[in-house]
Image (cartoon, rainbow, N blue to C red):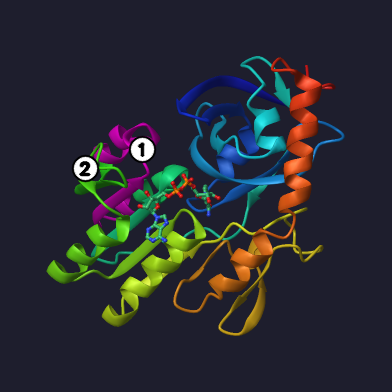
Amino acid sequence: MYRIVHKETVAPQVDAMIVDAPYIARHHQAGNFVVLRIHEKGERIPLTIADSDKKEGTITLLFQKIGKTTEELGTLKAGQSIMDIAGPLGHATPIEIYGHCVLVGGGIGSATLFPILRALKARKNKITVILGARTQDLLVWEDRFREYADTVLLTTDDGSSGRKGLVTEALKEVLDSAKVKIVIAVGPIRMMQAVSEQTRPYKVRTLVSLNPVMVEGTGMCGACRVSVSGKTRFACIEGPEFDGHEVDFQELASRLGFYRSEEAQAMEAFRKKCKGKCRSKGVK
Ligand code: NAD
């Protein structure tokens, strides 16, 4: 059992949880994720570790309540527990002395860039962070990013904060004006694809953190397979970060939509059962 130490809402439909998980916190490196199961009958879902505190023995998870499991996770409160959390999983982000790095975050995906920012800054890199969201309320952790980044650029689709437009527009300006060594992007698939297309003509190394369907997270089930450079790769054990210029985003997007109707049915059934005040059975 993994006890929830703190829980808060950080944006509409987005919650952050600090969870007691000393082993995971001790071994967490930027880029790692966990696979959790709320209770015995729960679905396994992957979540990137958004922060960890090795001294306190805690990890921070951010999640958008977009499916049955994330909605159920959002019903848990501080003091309650999650049954299983496996991790840290996946390869860590390669943290080197690069020079100028650009981190591009889309929506809630932005928060998972935070440990990468901190690790790159510890190696004395110069870092520009571009955070994009549909609207101001959905920009998460701006203050934390400002603490470590050299420059933070904000974009919103509706112009309610920062510049009006997409992250790729801000990225183009940075690429045109500076010698960028690496771009790391986390967010919706179409955004990571657009970022990769943007950096391609500049020949700038581009890493994207992929979020395919995952089941057990140890390379056995094959649910998370993605095509990279024409070869099948398992995101859980060979990723989750890959060269954005080599990823087949079209296939990834179509595989992610595979279970959409089942996901919608599960969500509807859960909401009916809850009538707005559901507590997970089997959770203390
Ligand atoms: P969203 O659709 O609101 O997009 C956020 C921002 O991304 C937009 O404001 C825009 O600036 C940019 N963007 C979106 N589509 C674009 C395009 N086609 N071209 C250029 N820029 C574009 O995002 P959301 O609803 O907050 O969703 C967040 C996504 O992040 C989810 O899909 C989630 O699965 C993903 N995510 C991934 C990870 C990971 O580790 N890979 C972690 C957390 C979240």
Dot 2 surroundings within 10 Å: few (below 14), some, or many (20 or more)?
Answer: some
Question: In the image, which residues are magenta?
Answer: 120-147
Out of 49 and 200, give the one closest to the viewer.
Answer: 200
Mark 2 sits on what residue? 162
Q: Residue at x 15, y 67 (%)?
A: 178
Helix, strand or loop at mark 2: loop
Between the residue at mark 2 and the residue at mark 1, the CA separation in whole angstroms equals 10 Å
Q: Quadrant of residue 217?
A: bottom right
Helix, strand or loop at mark 1: loop
Q: Which mark is residue 139?
A: 1
Q: Residue at x 31, y 55 (%)?
A: 166
Query: Residue 151 magenta-drawn?
Result: no
Which of the marked residues, 2 or 1, is nearer the chain's N terminus? 1
Whether residue 188 is visible, yes or no, is yes
Whether residue 83 is visible, yes or no, is no
Residue 62, image x and y in percent? Answer: 53, 36
Out of 17 and 89, give the one closest to the viewer.
Answer: 17
In the rendered image, the vertical position of residue 74 relative to residue 120, given as above or below: above
Q: Amino acid at mark 2?
A: Gly
